[in-house]
Image: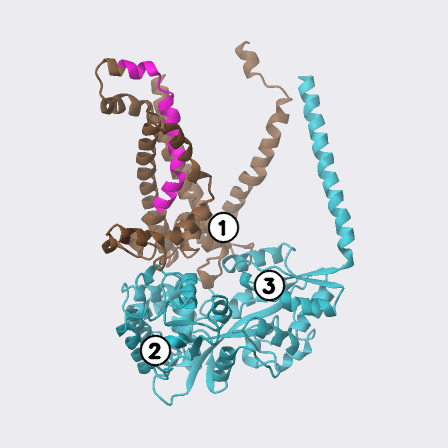
C-alpha cells in the first residue's frame, strides 16, 4: 500500500510541476507580446471578419504600436456572451452595441464608458441617432455609428423580360408580382421559417407606408394607438396579401436559403435589408444584375415613410486594460475616414458620422438617396416595447409567421401582439 | 479475503476518491446547486441579484407566455421521447437481431451501424436541414424520382411534421447505441438456451418472442432511460435544425432549447433573463432526476424479487 501511495504522490508532483512549467511558459510569451498593445473589437457580425480586418489594417498602419483584433461572436449568442465577459472582467475593449434597450442594458451593467467628454465630436452627430445610444439625461455610451434600411431587390433581366418597371405604389407592386406569377416565375425568395424576417424586414421595412412611419410609431409607443387600429391592421393585411406569391415550401425556407435563392437568380424579387448587398455580390448578383426599390407607397404622391433602422453603435469598455489605446481607436471610429472605409467595405450600412461620402456601390447610393426625401423611422416595436418579455419583437415574429401560414387572420395577429404586450407594457394597460 | 477486510475503510482511499470527487463537485454539483439558487433571483444583469423567492416559478407556471412555452416544451419533449423510444428501440432491436444471426455481412453491418453515432449532433443536424431544404433538398428530389411527389411537404416548416422530423434524425443518429446494447444482450444469451428452444421445436419467431425478448428486457429498460435522459436534456438538434427560436413558431421547442433561449437570448429574441432560465433548468433537473429515481426504484424492486 505504501508503494501505491508513493506512486500517487510522485504522479501528483509531476502533474504540479508540469502545470507550473506551462504557466511559466505562458508568462514568458506574455512578456514577449508586450511590445504591441492588443485591442479586441467584438461584434455580432461573424461574416465581416475579412472586411473588418482590412479596415483595421488602415488604423494599424498609422498606429504601429497597436494591434486591433476583430473577434465577432455568433449573432444568437452575442449579447449573452459579451455581457458575461464584461461582467467577469474578460470583455472586449471595443464593443458593437445594439440600439435602444439592448445596448442600454449593457451600459446599465456598468461596463461602458460615457463618451461625451472623451469624444466631443459626437455632439455633431444627428440627434435621432444619438438617442439610440444615450440616456435620457444625455450620457452617450456608444458612438452612434451605423443604420440600415429596407426595401425590395429584383433581378433586372426578369423585369426586362416582362416589360416591368419599379412599382411606386402597393397596387403596382402587387400587379408586378401577379404578372411574374402568371408567367410561371418564382416571385419572391421569401420564407416563413425565421420569423424575425417577417417582422423586422417585411412588416417594419416594406409595409411602413401602411402603418404610417414615425408618427404612428410614436403614437403606438405612447399608447395613443393600438396595433388593432386601422393603420396598423392595414399593414398586417398588406403583408398577408404577399403570401400568395411565395415559393412552394416557403414555410420551411430559412433566411440563408432565401438569400441564396435570390442571390443565385432562382427568384425574381426579395424583400430584404440594405446589409444584404454584400451577400448578393458574393453570390454573383452585383449591382449590374439587381435593382432595388423602396417600400411602396399606399397612394401616389404620398410622402415616403422609410424605415432607417439604428443598427450598430460602438461602445468602449471602461475597465479596459488599455483604456487610452482603446479610446483612441473608438475616436477613430467616429471620424469620416472610418465611416467611408466601413461603408465601402460593407455596402448597405450607412454611417451617421457627419461628412460627405463617396459611396462606391450604386444601389447603396440609391438607398441613401431615398432617405433625403422621406420621413425616417425605426422598426415598429423595437424601442421600449421590446425591453421585456414577451417582447414586441418576438410577439410580432410569431404572429406574422402564423398569419403567413393561415393559422391567424390579420386581425388575430394584430390582437395577439397587442394583448401580449399589454401583459407588461404600461402604456398598453390603460 | 474476509468480508471485514473487503469493507474496511483505509485512509489512503481518500487519494483515489478525491480527484473524481473534486471534479464532480466543482463541475457538476456546485453548478447545479448554484443554478437552483439563481432560480430564486431576478435582475437584468448576467448574474441576477434581486431575491424574489418563488416568483420565477410562479411566473413559469401561471403567466403568459412563460406558462405556454413551458407546457409546449413539456408536451413536445414527451412526443419527442415517445417517437425516439419507439423508433430507436424497434429498429435498433431489429438490426441487432439481424446482425447477430449467422448471415452474410453481419459483422460489417454490426460495425457500420455505429458510424452515425460517432458524428457530432450539429453536423448531423445541419446535414439533414440541407437534405430537407424545400428549395434544393435531396429528400424531395428523391420522392419525385420514385413518383411520390404528391407527398412533398415543407417538413421543417409545418408544426405537425417538424418535431417528428427532428426525432427521426436523432433516432437515426443514435440507433447505433441501441444496436450496440441489444447486440451485447443477444450475444450474452447462452447458445445452449437457444439450442434447447430449437430442440423443443421453437421456430425463429418463437425463439425471438419466448427466449430473446425476455432475456433482454433489462436492456430495453436501460436503453429507454438513456433515451429519456438524452431527450429531456436535448438541445443541439433543435439548435442545428430549428435555431434557438425552435422554428416553426416554437413547434420544435424542447426543454433544452427553451432553457437556452430563455437564459442567453435578449428579450428581443425571446429571452427571459438568467433567473427565469435557472428556473427552467431547475425544473428540467427535477423532472429528469425524479424519472430516473422512479426507474431505479422499479428496477431495484424487480431485481430484489429475482434474488
Query: Along the line of sight, which residue is nearer the eye, B234 or A148?
Result: A148
In the picture, the disc for residue A50 is: 3
**Figure colour of chain A:** cyan
Where residue A137 sits in the image (x, y, percent)?
59, 76
Q: Quadrant of the N terminus of chain A?
A: top right
Identify residue for label 1.
B40
The 10 Å Cα crowd at callout 1, few under 14, some 14 to 19, many 20 or more, is many
In the picture, the disc for residue A161 is: 2
Mark 1 and mark 3 residues within 8 Å of each other at the beta carbon? no
Where residue A235 sits in the image (x, y, percent)?
34, 76
- Identify the residue at image location x=50%, y=86%: A372
Q: Chain of mark 2?
A: A
Q: Which residues are magenta?
A: B167-196
In the picture, the disc for residue B138 is: none
Mark 1 and mark 2 residues within 8 Å of each other at the beta carbon? no
Query: Along the line of sight, which residue is nearer the eye, A94 or B41?
Result: A94
CA gap, disc 1 to disc 2?
64 Å
Q: Chain of mark 1?
A: B
Amino acid at each position: 500500500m505504501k508503494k501505491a501511495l508513493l506512486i500517487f504522490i510522485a504522479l501528483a508532483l509531476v502533474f504540479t510541476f508540469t502545470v507550473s512549467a506551462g504557466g511559466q511558459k505562458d508568462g514568458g510569451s506574455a512578456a514577449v507580446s508586450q511590445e504591441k498593445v492588443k485591442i479586441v473589437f467584438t461584434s455580432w457580425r461573424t461574416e465581416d471578419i475579412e472586411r473588418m480586418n482590412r479596415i483595421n489594417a488602415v488604423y494599424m498602419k498609422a498606429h504601429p504600436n497597436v494591434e486591433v483584433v476583430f473577434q465577432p461572436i455568433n449573432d444568437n449568442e452575442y449579447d449573452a456572451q459579451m455581457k458575461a465577459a464584461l461582467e467577469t472582467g474578460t470583455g472586449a475593449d471595443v464593443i458593437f452595441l445594439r440600439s435602444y434597450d439592448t445596448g442600454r442594458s449593457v451600459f446599465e451593467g456598468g461596463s461602458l464608458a460615457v463618451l461625451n467628454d472623451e469624444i466631443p465630436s459626437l455632439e455633431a452627430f444627428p440627434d435621432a441617432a444619438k438617442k439610440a445610444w444615450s440616456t435620457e439625461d444625455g450620457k452617450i455610451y456608444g458612438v452612434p455609428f451605423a443604420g440600415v434600411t429596407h426595401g425590395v431587390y429584383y433581378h433586372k433581366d426578369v423585369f426586362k423580360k416582362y416589360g416591368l418597371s419599379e412599382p411606386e405604389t402597393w397596387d403596382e407592386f402587387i400587379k408586378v408580382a401577379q404578372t411574374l406569377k402568371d408567367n410561371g416565375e418564382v416571385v419572391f425568395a421569401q420564407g416563413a421559417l425565421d420569423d424575425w424576417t417577417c417582422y423586422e424586414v417585411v412588416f417594419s421595412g416594406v409595409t411602413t407606408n401602411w402603418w404610417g412611419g414615425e408618427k404612428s410609431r410614436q403614437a403606438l409607443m405612447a399608447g395613443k394607438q393600438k396595433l388593432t387600429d386601422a393603420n396598423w391592421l392595414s399593414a398586417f393585411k398588406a403583408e398577408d396579401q404577399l403570401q400568395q406569391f411565395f415559393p412552394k415550401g416557403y414555410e420551411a425556407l430559412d433566411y440563408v436559403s432565401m438569400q441564396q435563392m435570390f442571390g443565385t437568380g432562382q427568384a425574381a424579387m426579395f424583400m430584404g435589408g440594405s446589409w444584404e448587398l454584400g451577400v448578393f455580390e458574393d453570390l454573383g448578383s452585383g449591382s449590374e444584375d439587381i435593382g432595388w426599390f423602396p417600400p411602396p407607397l399606399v397612394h401616389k404622391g404620398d410622402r415616403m415613410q422609410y424605415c432607417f433602422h439604428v443598427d450598430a453603435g460602438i461602445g468602449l469598455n471602461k475597465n479596459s486594460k488599455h483604456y487610452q489605446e482603446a479610446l483612441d481607436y473608438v475616436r477613430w471610429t467616429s471620424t469620416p475616414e472610418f465611416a467611408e472605409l466601413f461603408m465601402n467595405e460593407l455596402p448597405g450600412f450607412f454611417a451617421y458620422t457627419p461628412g460627405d461620402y463617396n459611396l462606391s456601390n450604386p444601389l447603396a447610393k440609391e438607398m441613401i438617396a431615398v432617405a433625403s426625401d422621406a420621413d425616417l423611422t425605426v422598426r415598429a416595436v423595437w424601442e421600449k416595447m421590446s425591453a421585456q418579455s414577451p417582447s414586441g419583437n418576438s410577439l410580432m415574429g410569431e404572429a406574422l409567421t402564423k398569419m403567413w401560414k393561415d393559422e391567424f387572420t390579420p386581425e388575430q395577429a394584430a390582437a395577439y401582439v397587442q394583448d401580449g404586450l399589454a401583459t407588461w407594457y404600461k402604456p398598453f394597460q390603460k | 479475503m474476509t468480508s471485514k477486510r473487503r469493507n474496511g475503510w483505509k485512509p489512503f482511499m481518500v487519494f483515489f476518491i478525491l480527484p473524481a470527487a473534486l471534479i464532480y463537485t466543482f463541475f457538476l454539483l456546485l453548478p447545479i446547486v448554484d443554478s437552483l439558487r439563481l432560480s430564486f433571483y431576478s435582475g437584468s444583469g448576467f448574474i441576477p441579484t434581486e431575491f424574489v423567492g418563488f416568483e420565477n416559478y410562479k411566473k413559469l407556471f401561471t403567466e403568459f407566455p412563460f406558462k405556454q412555452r413551458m407546457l409546449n416544451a413539456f408536451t413536445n419533449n414527451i412526443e419527442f421521447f415517445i417517437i425516439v423510444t419507439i423508433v430507436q428501440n424497434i429498429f435498433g432491436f431489429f438490426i441487432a437481431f439481424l446482425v447477430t444471426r449467422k448471415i452474410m455481412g453481419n459483422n460489417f453491418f454490426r460495425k457500420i451501424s455505429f458510424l452515425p453515432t460517432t458524428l457530432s449532433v450539429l453536423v448531423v443536424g445541419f446535414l439533414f436541414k440541407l437534405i430537407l431544404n424545400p428549395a434544393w433538398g435531396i429528400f424531395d428530389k428523391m420522392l419525385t424520382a420514385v413518383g411520390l411527389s404528391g407527398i412533398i411537404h415543407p417538413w421543417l416548416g409545418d408544426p405537425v411534421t417538424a418535431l417528428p422530423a427532428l426525432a427521426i434524425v436523432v433516432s437515426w443518429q443514435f440507433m447505433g447505441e441501441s444496436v450496440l446494447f441489444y447486440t451485447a444482450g443477444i450475444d450474452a444469451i447462452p447458445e445452449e438456451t437457444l439450442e434447447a428452444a430449437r430442440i423443443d421445436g421453437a421456430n425463429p419467431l418463437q425463439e425471438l418472442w419466448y427466449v430473446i425478448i425476455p432475456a433482454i428486457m433489462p436492456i430495453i429498460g436501460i436503453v429507454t432511460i438513456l433515451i429519456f435522459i438524452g431527450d429531456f436534456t436535448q438541445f443541439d438538434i433543435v439548435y442545428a435544425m430549428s435555431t434557438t427560436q425552435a422554428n416553426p413558431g416554437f413547434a420544435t421547442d424542447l426543454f433544452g432549447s427553451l432553457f437556452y433561449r430563455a437564459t442567453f437570448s435578449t428579450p428581443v429574441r425571446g429571452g427571459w433573463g438568467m433567473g427565469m432560465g435557472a428556473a427552467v433548468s431547475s425544473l428540467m433537473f427535477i423532472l429528469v432526476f425524479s424519472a430516473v429515481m422512479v426507474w431505479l426504484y422499479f428496477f431495484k424492486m424487480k431485481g430484489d424479487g429475482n434474488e
